[in-house]
Amino acid sequence: MVGPECRIGDGTRLDSHVVVVGFTEIGEGGHLHPFAVMGGAPQDRKYHDERTDVILGDDVVVREHATVHRGTAAGRGRTTVDDGSLLMAYAHVAHDCEVGAGVVMANGATLAGHVTVEDHAVLGGYAAIGQYLGVGEAAMVAAGAMVEQDVPPYCTVAGDRARVRALNTVGLRRRGMGDDKLAALRAAFRLLFRSRQPLAQALEAVERDVESTREVRHLVAFVEASRKGVCR
């Protein structure tokens, strides 16, 4: 079922029993598998059928029973999933979320409202991210993790409640990161998450002592901008 206000890009395939409703726009070359629901009303009692959107980019794959809810007037007004992302079976993207490019959400992974997931992050099966949190670029959230603070870029977090376990070395190498950039990230990681310094001092040490690659700068900026604190 495709609602009258929806737009579906060229080459996007909708299998049987897919539902696309509301003001939903889906890019080109995607694939929605049976029982996926895109653009459903948000599970927010403050929502009163205002005009809000869902936008999926190109080459997005949505597997069985996954759901993406539209935004709220009190939030961003839209929920977005960028190019090349994969939402596996029963994954849920709540209202006002912003999911980057190349993100993988494994079976049953769940985003509460107003979550931002940066590019190439991976969420393991049944991982859950709380409201208004961020998951950094190329981070790995282990299966079953319960996340109540921001997940730093390039890191692996696990547990209930989730804590940083290691640098996501495997994922970074798969993306083609070279030894020099990886060494700089390792140095920054040790200072931020292994030195036991107060966070402000650790950030100063990273800026003073670690090579300033793009990834190191992004890690520092993400930690500094966190409103709820980062997993440590």
Image: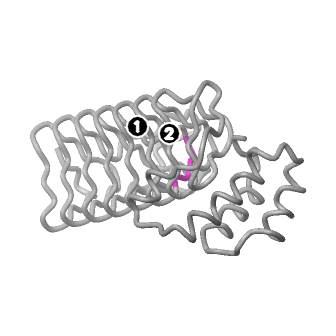
Mark 2 → mark 1, Cα distance in angstroms = 6 Å
The earlier-in-sequence mark between 2 and 1 is: 1
Residue 139 appears in the figure: yes
Are the residues flagged by discs 2 and 1 in contact, CB closer than 8 Å? yes
Q: Which residue is drawn at 55% across and 42% down?
A: 113
Residue 13 drawn at (x, y percent):
13, 54
Residue kind at label 1, given as amino acid type: His
Between residue 90 and residue 95, name the one nearer to us.
90
Q: What stretch is highlighted in magenta?
A: 113-117
Name the residue beneath numbered marker 1: 92
Q: Which of 67 and 216 is in front in this view?
A: 216
Q: Nearer the viewer, residue 119 or 205?
A: 205
Residue type marked 2: Leu
Residue plotted at (40% across, 63% down): 175
Label 1: how many Cα within 10 Å (few below 14, some 14–19, many 20+): many
Q: Give the x, y percent position of residue 20.
A: 25, 47
Q: Which mark is residue 198?
A: none
Q: Is residue 27 left or right of residue 218?
A: left
Q: Quick one: SS at disc 1?
A: strand
In the rendered view, tell whether residue 45 sits above or below residue 220.
above
Residue 28, placed above or below residue 189: below
SS at badge 2: strand
Residue drawn at 62 percent across, 32 percent down: 162
